[in-house]
Amino acid sequence: MKRLTVIGGGPGGYTAAFAAARAGMEVTLVEAAHLGGTCLNSGCIPTKTLKASAEALETARRAAEFGLAGTCDLKADMPAIVARKRRVSDTLRGGLEKTCAKLKVRVVTGRGQVISASLVRVTRDDGSVEEIAGDRVIIATGSSTLNLPSLPVDHTHILTSDDALELDHVPSSIIIVGGGVIGTERAFIYRAFGSRVTVVEGQTRILPVPGVDRDMSALIQREMKKAGIAVELCRTVNATETRDGAVVAHLGPSPFLPEDAIPAAARKEGTLEAEAGEDITVGRVPNTDGLGLAEAGIATDRRGYIAVNDELETGVPGVYAIGDILGPARVMLAHMAVAEAFVAVKNCLGGHETAKYDVVPSGIFASPEVADVGLTEEQAREKGFDVAVSTFQFRELGKAQAMGHLPGVFKLVADRASGKLLGAHLAGAHATDLIAETALALQMGASVQDIAHTIHAHPTLAEGVFEAAHMF
C-alpha cells in the first residue's frame, strides 16, 4: 500500500485525500487551520451564504410586485447573518471530518514542510514536531489575500475581503478596491444590505477577467448603475487615511493602462470617503511560507507559485502540486483544484494523466449571476476562427417573466462554418447553474445544432440556451 501525504485541506487537498483513500492508499492530511480551506471558511461558501441573505431581503422588498399585500420593513441583521454563515461552514466542515474518519484519512493539524517525497515535517501550534513518512506528497496549500502598501489594513476601517465577511453592522458606505469577481459580488451584497457602495477598478471594465466576455461586463455595469452602485474605472487607490472614524481614499489614474486609454475624468486626482470601512479585493499570493520549497529543490516562478509539468509533478519526483498554489498561469478556481486532485492521485498511483484547462466553467455570483465556459468572442477571433455569435435575451423567457428576473442574456460563440460551439457566456438568474449544459457540450465537441436539436423542458430558464442555439 502506497502512503500519501497531502499538505492543505482545501477543496483540492481534501478531494485528493478522499480519492487516494478510496483507491487504497494510506493517507495523511496536513492542515494548518480548518478543513475546507479558503473556499469553505472565508471564500466561496461564506460569500454565497451572505448572498442568499441579500437575495431574500431584495425579494421581500419586492413583495408588492408578486401580489403580496402588507407592510414589510425588513433589514439586514448582520450578527444573525454572520451567525448563519458560520453555521453553514461548520456543517460542511463537520461533513468533511466525518468523511475523513470514514475513509481512515489521518488529519494532522499543523504546518507542513516538504523534506522529500518520502518525508514531511509538521510543526504544530504548540511547537511540537512530527515527521510523517510516506511515498508521495501532494501540495495543496492555496493562496491568500494580497495586501498593498497603499491600503494598510487595520481590520477596523480598512478591511481585507475576509474581514468583510465578519462585519457586525452594515456600513453606511463602503469602498471596494477591485472590480473583479470578489469585489463585484461583495458590491451587490452590501448594496442590498443598505450600504452606499463605490467600486474602484484599475482596468477599463468591471470584471476584467480574460474568460468574461465584454458583453457580460457591460451588462453587470448597467445593473450596478441601476442598483445605485458607483463605479470608478481606470483609477486606483494611491493612499488611504482614517479621519474621524471614516476612511479617505486618494484616487489617481491607473498605472496599468496607457495614457490614451484613460478617460480625461479618470486622469484627475480625487478622493472618496467611506463612513465605515473599505473592502480590499485586489489579488492573491501563494501560501508557500514554511513549506521549505527551496530546500527541497522545488522550483517556483518569480511570484512564488510552484512550477509543475503536465502531470502536475514538481521537479522533485513524487512531489505533486495542485490548486491555487500553481498560480494564474493555470486556473485558480476551487473546482479546477478538484479536477487537478483526481489527476495528481492517479499519477501518484503510477498513471500518466494530464490536467486539461480548455473546458473550465466559472461562475460569478453578482446580481444577476454571470457564468462562462470556453472562448470569449474576442478570444475566438484572436485564435483565427470565423466567428458566429448568437444571443437571446433573458426577458424573453416565460419562466424569467414569471420569476420577475428579467435582466440577462444568453450568448453562444461558434465556428461559422461547422457550427462547433467555442464558448458560452450567460448572465441572469441561476446562470451559474445553467452553464453546466454548455460545459458538457464543449467537452463532447458538440455543435450549436446539437443543442438546438435537444428538446428542453418548458417553462425553464434552460430554454434560453436552446433559443440562442436556434438563433444561430
Image: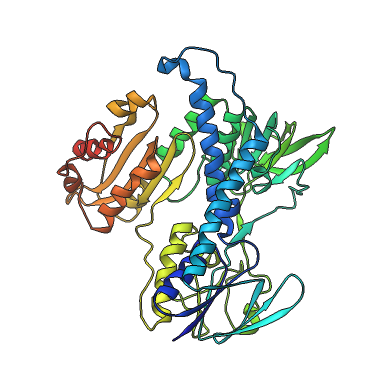
In the rendered image, which quarter is residue 146 located in? bottom right
Tell me the colour scheme of the image. rainbow
> Relative to residue 236, is residue 418 depicted above or below?
below
> Relative to residue 174, is residue 48 depicted above or below?
below
In this view of the protein, can residue 65 be seen by the observer?
yes
> Relative to residue 271, is residue 280 depicted above or below?
below
Left or right, 299 with reference to 164: left
Between residues 337 and 83, which one lies in front from this camera angle?
A: 83
- Can you name the residue that lies furthest to the left here? 453
Which residue shows up at 28% across the image and 58% down it? Answer: 443
Between residues 198 and 233, which one lies in front from this camera angle?
A: 198
Which residue shows up at 37% across the image and 44% down it? Answer: 433
Image quadrant where one finds the N terminus? bottom left
Which residue shows up at 77% across the image and 72% down it? Answer: 126
- Can you name the residue that lies furthest to the right here? 244
In this view of the protein, can residue 385 be seen by the observer?
no
Left or right, 381 with reference to 155: left
Q: Where's residue 18, x and y in %?
A: 45, 69
Image quadrant where one finds the C terminus? top left
| Total number of numbered discs in the rendering | 0
Between residues 221 and 81, which one lies in front from this camera angle?
A: 81
Q: Where's residue 460, x and y in %?
A: 28, 34
Left or right, 171 with reference to 364: right
Which residue shows up at 25% across the image and 37% down it? Answer: 468
Q: Where's residue 142, x and y in %?
A: 57, 63
Between residues 99 and 126, which one lies in front from this camera angle?
A: 99
Left or right, 2 with reference to 354: right
Q: Where's residue 189, x and y in %?
A: 57, 35
